[in-house]
Image: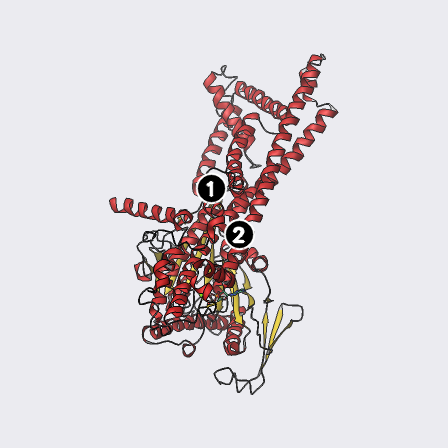
Amino acid sequence: MPAEAKDDAAPKRKSEGITVFLRMRPTKHPSKFYDVGDNEGKGQSLRWDIPPDAVTKDGEYINNTKTQWAFKFDQVLPMDISQAQVFDRVGKHVVQNALDGYNSTVFAYGQTGSGKTFTITGGSERYEDRGIIPRALSMIFQAFRERSDCSWSAHVSYMEIYNEQGFDLLNESSGAKALQDLPRVRMMEDEHGNFHLRNLSMHRATSEEEALNLLFLGDTNRAISETAMNQASSRSHCLFTVFLECRGAGGSDKVRRSKLHLVDLAGSERVHKTKSDGITLNEAKYINTSLFYLEMVIVALNEKNKKARDHIPYRNSMMTSVLRDSLGGNCRTVMIATCSAEKPQTEESISTCRFAQRVALVKNDAVLNEETDPSVTIARLKSEVSTLRAEIGYLKGEAGEGDELTDAERAELHSACEVYVKSRDPDETLRVAPLTLTRIRDCFALLKNMVLQALASQGTGGSTDEQLKATLKERDNEIAILVNMVRQARGGGTAPTPSIASEAKEFSPPSSEKKAEPVRRLDPREQLAEDRARMKHRLPDEVAGVSIYVDDAEVRDDPKRAWLYFREKCRIAHVLEDNKRVLKEKYCEAKACGEKVNATRKAIAYLKQSIEAIRRERAIEGVVNEDDLQKADPEEQRKIDAIAQEKEVYKQNFESLRRLKTEIEHVQKMLESGRKKLQKEYDEWYAHVLRRGHNKQPTNAWATPPASPAQSAVSPTQSSQPKEEDDNEDVRAFYAAKAELEALRAKQ
Ligand code: ADP
Ligand code: MG
């Protein structure tokens, strides 16, 4: 895959700067050191004013030389901004650019914990916390449906760069237990100075669901590289790319290709801030080297603007090589600088702002990536030549009147007329060579017939019966799926969907009668979290934010009560409740839409019947003249208009149904993983609670499971997973599919 191409000869370039947004991560305790204001009508300003004696918690001076800074941004996104609003302000335009054929990039830069991953990928718990990537995918496939005059394709790749090595996150093998198990991506440079990425898989996504599944797969593999410092990896860069292609817009032979990079950079904090040792120090060094080279590229680009230098040192690091187009090249780029407003982070926040200012000065030269598809052009030229030859022959009088056409020739002529009529290209010509008077006459007759048929079919809503039937059949299938989902949500279905049907027992307290579960395979994310927890070797005071010191002995010794107690206190349980609420709302919406779709279908069928009845009546009354039949009477016209309106309502509701279906699947997935997490946290917590309750001097909670009399009756580890077997069908299906794929590959 060509990573970045040199665009020295691109025509009509117009330099434009990188748009820079600042996003402040919400905090309950923001420092009073900064102030947001207008920047003379152009964007916004952020001023820092730090008292000279301000110190951090660690007793360090925040800055003992300069105390005031002023930075300019295109927009400063307020702390309380929702993810939907962020997409509206930042992501939407970027995706639109990519759909229009321009390379586009969004990259998030900031210290670890400032919200880069939250902004780019989103939170993994709440549906409304979806970040730019899933929302971009949704917008892309929505556009594919709306702009159906061209043939679209989307391919996805997802790469992680760690210690200057690229790893393919879209590797489907389930065996990867560490980042090193993922396929390595190599960077190559050809003789023209273009970079290519070898061994990075590209996956075609034909629907939003498929694209989201790829993101899910990549994020699962990404979790492998999590570090103990932060939930998501702070030490690597992640690059999610969508390659878009649009062929034949408006019947032309043009192809547009664009790349949409969505980049989550490594944490920008300095080495002394990371509490690193051994290998981590080495890793930290790499991050800094890589971000250091990014700074060098930006500085060089700033100097290039001033004509002070020419060479830009892209090839010093893999990340800058991959992002070559995005930084000063053929791309429309947006930076989101993420900051924390807390006092101890002030110094890092200021250095993020300072870097953002330099990025804002970089000039990019985005061009429309459009070219002519030679195969389409050749086919068009060939056909033009044969038409022209025929015309010349006709003008020379070579063709004469021509013989009567055979059935096969007439069928051929019919197809040519159909192609001509259906083409949206205003320059399309009718290809009927060899041209003879007979053929011309037949063509006119065929075309007249088509016009008459089209006029007649207007009475049935502008579509032939067959087309309408086919569309209805296709849509019936989709509606059936949704109606089934809704039924299941209400408990009326025969085969319950895992998440909703199991809702009643989802939070059922652990039961002591429950048999031991078979050993369950953990997914990589869980595995990693567990390994990490084991490595800590110390007894925590709380698990998932819930203290393990439970004073009430009744709660401690009764797993039922303990479960209720944990649920009440644990944040994840509340998030799950939220997601369930969202899911219910979406089901209700889907149900309402489904009902509307059905109602409009019935209304259309009824209107069609009454139009036919009117026509029959007119025929019986003696109006049998073909011309009169083409003219609708006023009543018939009203019904035709009503059908058009109903069709519009049908279309809108059907679109909403389709969108809801995708959203429902997404929330279900989140709910599934949330449930697993809650159960796991509960197990961990209850094991500690029991240990505390029966052994006042614990040493290592992870060494052995608690062995108390109470526990021998109720093993929390067993008991709190009463629903795994029922609930995780999706997850098991995912692994089963993976295993199958692997087995198939092994056979090959
Ligand atoms: P980074 O990727 O920069 O290291 P994260 O995106 O992982 O930081 O954010 C750190 C934590 O803060 C995560 O738990 C994340 O969910 C939370 N977080 C970040 N930004 C926001 C936000 N705008 N609103 C709510 N939570 C946020
Ligand atoms: Mg992150």
Locate residue 264, reporting x and y percent: 46, 63
Side (left or right) of 320 relative to 518:
right
Q: Given the image, on which type of amino acid does mark 2 rest?
A: Lys
The quarter of the image holding the C terminus is top left
Residue 476 spot, x, y in % from top left: 53, 33
Q: How many marks?
A: 2
Residue shown at the point (31%, 61%) measured from the top left: 180
Local crowd size for mark 2, using a 10 Å CA cut-off: few (<14), some (14–19), many (≥20):
many
Q: CB under 8 Å between callouts 1 and 2?
A: no
Residue 496 is tagged as 1
Residues packed near mark 1 inside 10 Å, few (<14), some (14 to 19) or many (20 plus): some
Residue at (67% x, 21% y) in the render: 630
Residue 580's disc is 2
Question: In the image, is 166 to the left or to the right of 126?
Answer: left
- Work out whether residue 16 or residue 288 is closer to the camera in this orientation and state it: 288
Residue 518: x and y in percent read: 32, 51
Q: Reply above or below: 270 against 637.
A: below
Badge 1 element: loop
**Earlier along the polypeptide chain: callout 1 or callout 2?**
1
Amino acid type, label 1: Pro
Q: Nearer the viewer, residue 373 or 129?
A: 129
Q: CA distance from mark 1 to mark 2?
A: 16 Å
Report the front residue among 305 and 486.
Answer: 486
Q: Is residue 484 visible?
A: yes
| Position above or below: 477 against 173 | above
Task: For the N terminus, give its image quadrant.
Answer: bottom left
Residue 547's spot in the image, x, y percent?
A: 46, 69
**Of helix, strand and loop, which one carries label 2?**
helix
